[in-house]
Image (cartoon, grey):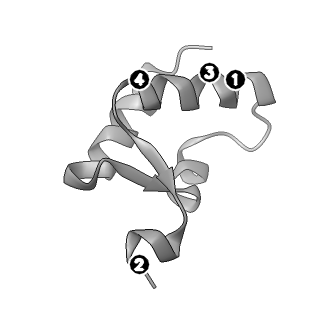
Amino acid sequence: MDWSETIRAAIAIAGVRSSLTLDQLNSLVPMRTKPEDVEALLTALCDRGIWLTDESASGMP
């Protein structure tokens, strides 16, 4: 699966914090995405310096 548009959107959302919450990531990924595709997406994001955080760690309510 080509994740280029999703990765661009994730980078824009992550901004200067370079992190996304799980909710933000879920809003970008189709509901029925295969686990191996999610793993590939997470790897691609990490390779670009974007990390997943939980909401409490990101300072969001």
For the image, the number of numbered tags is: 4
Cα distance in 3D space between marks 4 and 2: 24 Å
Dot 4 falls on a residue whose secondary structure is: helix
Circles 4 and 2 in contact, beta carbons < 8 Å: no
**Residue 16, numbered circle:** none
Q: Residue at x 46, y 70 (%)?
A: 57
**Residue 60, numbered circle:** 2
Q: Residue at x 80, y 37 (%)?
A: 32
Cα distance in 3D space between marks 1 and 2: 27 Å
Circles 1 and 3 in contact, beta carbons < 8 Å: yes
Residue 42 in the image: above or below residue 51: above
Cα distance in 3D space between marks 3 and 4: 10 Å
Cα distance in 3D space between marks 2 and 3: 26 Å
Residue at mark 4: 47
Residue 49's spot in the image, x, y percent?
A: 34, 34
**Residue 40, numbered circle:** 3
Q: Residue at x 67, y 40 (%)?
A: 30
Give the quadrant of the N terminus.
top right
Residue at mark 1: 37
Nearest to the eye among marks 4 and 2: give it: 4
Residue 25 in the image: above or below residue 40: below
Number of residues whose C-alpha sits closer than 10 Å to that of mark 2, classed few (under 14), some (14–19) or many (20 or more): few
Cα distance in 3D space between marks 4 and 1: 15 Å
Please state if 23 lies on the left or on the right of 44 as rendered: right
Q: Quadrant of residue 31?
A: top right
Please state if 8 lies on the left or on the right of 54 as rendered: left
Residue 56's spot in the image, x, y percent?
A: 50, 77
Q: Mark 1 is on which residue type? A: Asp
